Image (cartoon, grey):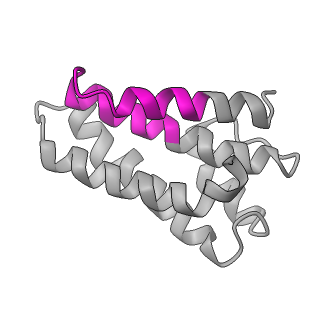
Amino acid sequence: MAGFDTHKEKYEMFKKDAGNEAISIPTRIEAYFNACFHMIEANVANMGIHINKHQLVRSILEKNSQIFGDQTEKVWRTFQEIENQIRPGQIYGSVIDGKKLQRTKELFRAIEKICGDSLK
């Protein structure tokens, strides 16, 4: 299983890709999604726990609320908005929406703010 350093490296890689305006909106949204996952996973790995699959973010965080404390629900709800409400329509559907990209950036920044201290 990957550790903190690997997840941090992937977070940084996907964050860079997400900021690349030369690539498509859906690809950038997918990159923000992956950056969020690895950002969360890096924090979890610091505690010796691993999520391994993005579908398990909520259950792992709820079982280990000490990781994010009173911000636990905010982290998983924010992640799930990208995962379940934004990403599918942009990646699999017929819609390409710059407003959804902007919303994804906002959600990414919210998770980054909560996770950020441990990633420095």
Q: Judge left or right: residue 32 versus residue 66.
A: left
Quadrant including the N terminus: top right
Which residue is located at x 31 percent, y 27 percent?
20
**Residue 99 visible to the viewer:** yes
Q: Position of residue 45 (x, y in %)?
A: 79, 43
Give the main secondary structure, helix, strand or loop, of the magenta stretch: helix
Q: Is residue 16 magenta?
A: yes
Q: Judge left or right: residue 69 versus residue 17.
A: right
Quadrant location of residue 29?
top left
Which residue is located at x 45 percent, y 62 percent?
110
**Residue 92 visible to the viewer:** no
Q: Please, which residue is most extreme toward the top here?
A: 22
Q: Foreground: 89 or 100?
A: 100
Badge count: 0
Q: Foreground: 119 or 31?
A: 119
Q: Which residues are magenta?
A: 10-35
Which residue is located at x 86 percent, y 52 percent?
47
Q: Where is 51 relative to 80, above or below?
A: above
Q: Is residue 113 magenta?
A: no
Q: Judge left or right: residue 108 versus residue 11.
A: left
Q: Please, which residue is most extreme toward the right here?
A: 48
Q: Judge left or right: residue 96 versus residue 47.
A: left
Q: Please, which residue is most extreme toward the front here?
A: 120
Q: Foreground: 30 or 110?
A: 110
Q: Position of residue 77 (x, y in %)?
A: 47, 63
Q: Where is 87 relative to 114, above or below?
A: above
Q: Position of residue 79 (x, y in %)?
A: 47, 53
Which residue is located at x 62 percent, y 57 percent?
115
Q: Position of residue 31 (x, y in %)?
A: 41, 31
Q: Where is 94 relative to 66, above or below?
A: above
